[in-house]
Amino acid sequence: MSIHTKTLAELALGLRNKEFSSVELTRALLARIEAAQPTLNALVSITQDGAFAQAAAADREIASGRGSTLTGVPILHKDLFCTEGVRTTCGSRMLDNFIAPYDATVVAKLKAAGTVMLGKTNMDEFAMGSSNETSFYGPVRNPWNVELVPGGSSGGSAAAVAARLAPAATATDTGGSIRQPAALCGVTGFKPTYGRVSRYGMIAFASSLDQGGVICASAEDAAIVLRAMAGFDPRDSTSVDRPVPDYVAALQMPLSGLKIGLLKEFFDAGLDAQNERRIREALALYERLGARLQEVSLPNLPLSVPAYYVVAPAECSSNLARFDGVRFGYRCEQPRDLTDLYRRSRGEGFGAEVKRRIMTGTYVLSAGYYDAYYLKAQKVRRLIADDFDRAFAQVDVLMGPTTPTAAFELGSKTADPITMYLNDIYTIGANLAGLPAVSVPCGFAGNLPVGLQIIGPHFAEERLLNAAHGYQRETDWHSRVPPGWD
Amino acid sequence: MEWETVIGLEIHAQLATRSKIFSGSATAYGAPPNTQANLVDLGYPGVLPVLNGAAVRMAVKFGLAIGAEIAPVSVFARKNYFYPDLPKGYQISQYELPVVARGALSIVLEDGSEKRIGITRAHLEEDAGKSLHEGLARYSGIDLNRAGTPLLEIVSEPDLRSAREAIAYMKKVHTLVRYLEICDGNMQEGSFRCDANVSVRPRGQGSFGTRAEIKNLNSFRFVEKAIHHEVARQIDLIEGGGRVVQETRLYDPDRDETRSMRTKEEANDYRYFPDPDLLPLELSPALIAEVRSELPELPDQKAARFASQYALSAYDAGVLTASRELGDYFEAVAKGCPGEPKLAANWVMGELSAALNRDGLEIGASRLSAPQLSGLLHRIADGTISGKIAKEVFEAMWSSGRDADAIIAEKGLKQITDSGVIERAIDEVMARNPGQLADYRAGKDKLFGFFVGQVMKATQGKANPAQLNELLKRKLSGG
């Protein structure tokens, strides 16, 4: 078994047992990254020098008997987490020259835990997209078939983990940006409860929806990383002050008696027949493991896409106002005056999808439209959250597909934003309600991976990880490596 | 036609917190540009605001002091507009749900009656930075030291009917915020400034006229002049057949006029919405009770107490409570000089205030301490020196910082109360001025003052005035 196909848990054990050093592991993975870059384009920056320095320091820690589970484990960061002294682009020309002067809390925590940063992953520009095609740095390609998209916006993170370039990559999820690419790339993507992971240093897209999480091969790996990432941060007023459970210790609970709700609204006409078959097979396995299934209806859930495409652009139109060419980031050449500086810096610095959302958001917040759009969307959001609350009074977790279809061809949906937006139809609900959710590989449609989505009540991370891990103990879908990357 | 003026004020009081409202940067005034701006103030990608609890307590303090409702839940909102000194492209403010609502203050009108001025709301917000143009060719500079400084915006009802009322109200708020120690009130540094909404209507008309908002008035005098100017402009406009348009105007103190900045049509659509980076601000009854227990004696309460405890007029009590420091000073003087509160009040409002004004000092920087002034007043009360000599002693104390007794002893200013000494002086004056004496005795009563002056001169002003009067009268009439 080659070193790169080991899970994060196996690598951590190998490091501790000194089967290999962190420097060796880092060298091996950096070589894979270099080799994969022309094909997959999964990274925006490769931080080779920093990685070797961190790996050497980690090896010294391990040699002296100190260090934590993650000491010496190489990881990647999505390029919207600020990394001190390292370029942080958010996939945008606007930040092509931006060297972050500080570490995001997530980055600082994982650094303190001893991880080694190999680089920064490609992503849709400002996390706006479902296919990784809006990146200023070009699209990421799906390792299962390079003609296909990896999903988005955390497409670089998902593709890199799928191609075994790194055992884990941080990611963020505003409307499905962790779970959808994880499903399309056949890896495990975990989005925690809103407020569980600090947003400080995560470049904001839609503040009330954005949540940092992780993409790994397995739920066990996700538990290890999440344990180090999560927790209250006094610098983020929306982070929640409650203790972080030991997610790893919680993985061994039996699944018997688990009450699973089948999300009726997710098994709609848009769901591909092969995907549906894989999901129903996964549910049948849970039943065999002692879980009980019942259908649950969330009548307002079909309104989640329109509600999301009001709320998220509204917040983004305001969040992205700071990119004005004055203090950092892209500035146009030879501005004539202030208005020209604003117009051209923003006009040239932002791509089409970002501009579309800024304009949509500006419109829905405008005088005379605020009540009809923004306020109405917030009310719908409340209704959807209430639907979830009612469902969780009956069941422990909700299950359904992560996406309507498997990965699609590059360029096939870029002409029609609505078609693209509908790819997130099953994932957005959890963001609107702030719920934790995970996508787990559950088989293939043709040669392409399919993701099972598990959604839980607020702060039920342990329950979700346990449910995902229980399934992965019985299946090997999460261990499948795309042909040519094994 | 007789016109009535209608004014509402929006006062911006900079809260006296050590750090900014959403970041840990210092708020001190006058630092070199951009040395008090951290990543949050600069609006860097990824940073988040964290509310300063001290600013919240100050807002609550103000709300309690004006008898307002303190919102159990209030909401921070984003006011979106582009400007180079606004780093995030939005200002965090409070919009639909302010922390303080529906309070009032009363002002004293010229005829002595009181008028209640409603305060619609007071909300927390962050200040913007400053654009610098001086000394920079082709460029503008940005100083973000002020960006994120906490402000309390205090919005009055349109209850004010003249520039005088507006000034009285503004001074009342100014006094109150300094009593509460929530704002240093420094208008030159912009810590206390206001916008005035001004309109006119024919007297008797129920509905308001169209208003103009005059921005950024940073002295009482400018507020008064700007309102006078604006009222005259609006009346001229209407009487000339024109119409007032709703707009924002800027007062130019150099030309003493207001100029249009932008009309309603040109106004920004601020696209307010709740700030998703900040949770709603929840205030527990326990916190409100705690802040209430920390409230100092308020200006009106102190004035009422002074009036009854020290038997002062309402006017004097009002003057002496204009600031907390002045009230404390007066009270210390009065306590150091029991039984003579009126004397203490007169000296604090008279000589002391004049000397402070002359030297441009605040009461806190007075060259005379309250016990020193009490010491002087003691010597007036016990007859050691006359009121006139006391003024001389006061000046000597003011310039030297020494105590009254030392100066009286050194200069030999102790009053002469020995009738023998006074009589001898009178006799000498009478002997030296036989002509005036004859005229006086022939009925020229006015010459009495001449003799008083001569005797005082002879005694270097130290003769006890009452004794001198009595003895002189007797001697002149030949007794």
Image (spheres, rainbow, N blue to C red):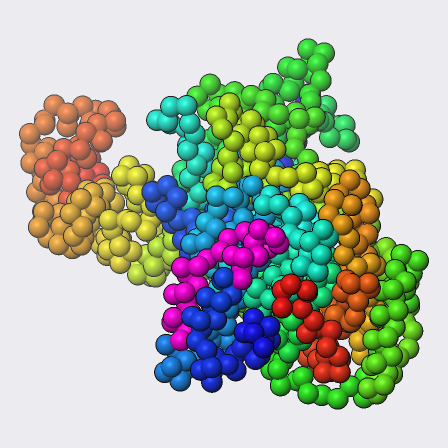
**For this rendering, which residue is in front, B110 or B363?**
B363
Q: Quadrant of the N terminus of chain B?
A: top right
* Above or below B86: residue B137: above
Residue A52 falls left or right of residue A201? left
Q: Main secondary structure of the magenta part?
A: helix
Q: B446 above or below B354?
A: above
One can see residue B149 in this view: no
Q: Is residue A119 visible?
A: yes
At x 49%, y 37%, the residue is A326
Foreground pick, A385 / A109: A109
Q: Is residue A38 magenta?
A: yes
Give the total number of marks visible in the rendering.
Answer: 0
Q: Does A99 appear above or below B3?
A: below
The C terminus of chain B - image quarter: top left
Residue at position x 34%, y 59% in the image: B332
Q: Which residues are magenta?
A: A32-59
Q: Indicate left or right for A116 with A174 as reference.
A: left
Question: How far from the left and from the top, in percent, is residue A356?
Answer: 71, 39
Image location of residue A438, percent across then percent down? 72, 69
Residue A60, x across and y down, in percent: 37, 76
Q: Position of residue B414 (x, y in %)?
A: 14, 50
Q: Residue at x 77, y 53 (%)?
A: A408
